[in-house]
Image: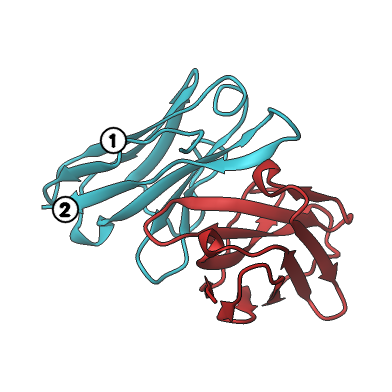
Chain colours: A cyan, B red
């Protein structure tokens, strides 16, 4: 069971907006940055959002990140068929000796 | 152009030690604030962080694998090596290496992954 909790699935139709959530605690999301990755089967995960709300160059502004308290969100606007993938959130967890933790992943289906 | 590539055995037996090598190009592990880490994904499971080593030789490990995993670097060869002892079928996974620059904070460039199966 992952330390960061993500609803396992989400869906939307082309053009719609969807929001993926990631729930953590005060030792991770509550006090550290959040990262989001897009993962297609058989490929390397792609960084979408870093330091909670920053986009790497080349990532469309349709993707945006935010957090409030111990929860974070990834919003995707103007949904496209190529957005169908598994999305992971990640954060540093300060408990014990500290570690990077990932969420369980959310499969986004574009209907 | 930044690239990373994992190499190592595709099949190991239970109780054996796994050694995986990440060979990278386009950046240097002598640059302050840069790290290279390992992440794995078991079939049908989520990503799991394993270890990371930084340019200043600081290494951090996942508490769940403490004592089984060692990460080292060879800056002259642009390589990072992950060693995992006492392999078990539950360690069957795709193993990724990835770069972690301090300006980003977590992994930006990833290798394509190497599938390792643990079976007798």
Mark sitting on residue B25: none
Q: Which mark is residue A110?
A: 2
User: Looking at the image, which is closer to me, B38 or B54?
Assistant: B38
Secondary structure found at label 2: strand
* Residue drawn at point x = 82 percent, y = 65 percent: B72
Quadrant including the N terminus of chain B: bottom right
Residue A43 visible in this rendered orientation of the protein: yes
Callout 2 environment at 10 Å: few (<14), some (14 to 19), or many (20+)? Answer: some
Label 1: few (<14), some (14–19) or many (≥20) C-alpha neighbours in 10 Å:
some
Q: Position of residue B82 (x, y in %)?
A: 73, 66
Q: Residue at x 41, y 43 (%)?
A: A104
Residue at label 1? A19
B89 in relation to A21, above or below: below
Residue B39 sits in quarter: bottom right
Label 2 vs 1, first from the N-terminus: 1
- Residue at 86% x, 65% y is B30
Q: Secondary structure at mark 1?
A: strand
x and y, in percent, of residue A81 in the image: 19, 59
Q: Position of residue B51 (x, y in %)?
A: 70, 54
* A111 horizontally vs B83: left or right: left
Q: Nearer the viewer, residue A4 or B119?
A: B119
Determine if marks 2 and 1 fall on one subunit.
yes
């Amino acid at each position: 069971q992952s330390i960061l909790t993500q609803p396992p699935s989400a869906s939307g139709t082309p053009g719609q907006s969807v929001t993926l959530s990631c729930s953590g605690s005060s030792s991770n999301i509550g006090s550290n940055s959040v990262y989001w990755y897009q993962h297609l089967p058989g490929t390397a995960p792609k960084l979408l959002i870093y330091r909670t709300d920053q986009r790497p160059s080349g990532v469309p502004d349709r993707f945006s990140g935010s957090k409030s308290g111990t929860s974070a969100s990834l919003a995707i606007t103007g949904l496209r068929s190529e957005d169908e993938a598994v999305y992971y959130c990640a954060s540093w967890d300060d408990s014990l000796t500290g570690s990077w933790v990932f969420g369980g992943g959310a499969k986004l289906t574009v209907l | 152009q930044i690239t990373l590539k994992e190499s190592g055995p595709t099949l190991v037996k239970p109780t054996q030690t796994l050694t995986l090598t990440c060979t990278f190009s386009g950046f240097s592990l002598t640059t302050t604030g840069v790290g290279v880490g390992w992440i794995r994904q078991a079939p049908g499971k989520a990503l799991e962080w394993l270890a990371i080593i930084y340019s200043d030789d600081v290494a951090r490990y996942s508490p769940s694998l403490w004592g089984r995993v060692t990460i080292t670097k060879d800056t002259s060869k642009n390589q990072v090596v992950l060693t995992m002892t006492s392999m078990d079928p539950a360690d069957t996974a795709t193993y990724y290496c990835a770069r972690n620059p301090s300006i980003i904070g977590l992994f930006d460039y990833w290798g394509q992954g190497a599938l390792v199966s643990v079976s007798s």
